[in-house]
Every structure is written in C-alpha cells, then in structure tokens.
Amino acid sequence: MAEADMEPGDQIAEEVTGQIVQMNQSAARQVEADKVEMHQSAAQVIDAEAITMHSAAAQVIDADTLRMNHSLALAANSETLAVEQSRLGILRTSDATLADTQVSILVGDHIQAANVNALLLIGDTIEGDVKPVLDSRGALLFGLAVGGVLGLFSLLFGRRSRRD
C-alpha cells in the first residue's frame, strides 16, 4: 500500500486504500488505510488505525484513534476519541474527550466532557459538563405526551371499530 491523495474536483471514489490517505475537498464511498486525514471531505465508510477529520463528514467509522474538529459522524467505534465542535450520532469508545459537541448516543469507559449536549451518555467514569437533551422532568413530560396521544388514538379507533 502507498500514499493516496484526493484533490479538489476529483469525482467520488468508490474505494480508496493506502497507508496514508489524504482527502481534500473530496468524497469516497469506502476508505481503508493506516492513517486518514480529511479536510472538507466526506466518506461513507472509513476503516483506519488513525483518523483526523477537519470540517469533514463520515457515515460509519472504525478506528483506533479518531480526532474530529468541526465535523460530523453518524456511527463510530474507536479506542480513543478527541472531538471539538462536532456532531456525533452513535459512538462506542474506550477513552473520549469532547468539547462543545452534540452527541446522540455515546457509550464509553472514560469520558471527559466540556459543554456537551447528549441525548444518551453511558460511561464508567464521566467527568465535566454534560447537558442532557432530556432531563428527568423533560423525559416525564415527553412520556406523558406520547402516552396521551396513543391513548387518544386508541379510543378513537376503538369506537370506530365497534360501530362497524
């Protein structure tokens, strides 16, 4: 494997492989490498030992080390995660450091957070400032609202079926 560079204006690559892959204003369906560096780029699937993303997006990531800045990831699995000013979907990591980030679901062993908004955060050790999207009061109100709507539909459709 060798080094692979993708420059601005390149078409969407199906598969990019190499020891070091550098993407600049490019897109790829699948990237497999020892080291991936992305700047203003996107990839559907990335499998690498180390990934650095700056103003980039990825759908599925599997990495030993993942560093993100102003980036977006839908699903990721990494041993070490360092994220700043990014948005994350579902993540599994051993050691995470997050700052000014929004996370849907994060499961980790050790999590350090500064100004993080999370829907669901599960960790053995969680340090720092995490703001839940739904606190206990919000979760209760959400449950009551959903239950009320489902109960109303049940009554309406129950009466309709009895008439027929």
Image: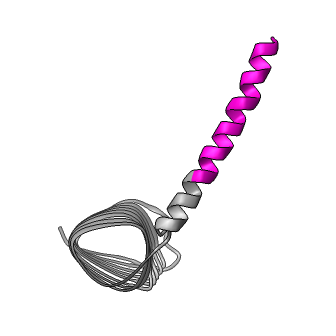
Residue 15 position in % (x across, y down): 35, 58
Q: Quick check: can you spot residue 156? A: yes
When asked about the image quadrant of residue 104, the answer is: bottom left
Residue 101 position in % (x across, y down): 43, 81
Residue 109 position in % (x across, y down): 18, 70
- The part of the chain drawn in magenta is 144-164
Left or right: 114, with 70 as reference point: left
Report the residue at 55% width, 52% height from top. 143
Colour mode of the rendering: one colour
Query: Of 38 and 135, which appears nearest the observer?
Result: 135
Report the residue at 46% width, 82% height from top. 55
Q: Which quarter of the figure is the C terminus placed in?
A: top right
Query: Of 141 and 113, which appears nearest the observer?
Result: 141
Magenta highlight: main SS: helix
Query: Of 135 and 1, which appears nearest the observer?
Result: 135
Query: Of 87 and 13, which appears nearest the observer?
Result: 87
Report the residue at 32% width, 64% height from top. 91
For residue 2, above or below residue 147: below
- Asked whether 33 falls inside the magenta stretch, the response is no
Left or right: 107, with 147 as reference point: left
Q: Which quarter of the figure is the N terminus placed in?
A: bottom left
For residue 20, above or below residue 99: above
Q: Which residue, as the protein is rendered here, is positioned at the far right?
A: 163
- Asked whether 158 falls inside the magenta stretch, the response is yes
When asked about the image quadrant of residue 14, the answer is: bottom left
For residue 155, above or below residue 74: above
Left or right: 149, with 78 as reference point: right
State how many labels appear: 0
Report the residue at 51% width, 61% height from top. 139
Q: Quick check: can you spot residue 79? A: no
Residue 11 position in % (x across, y down): 50, 66
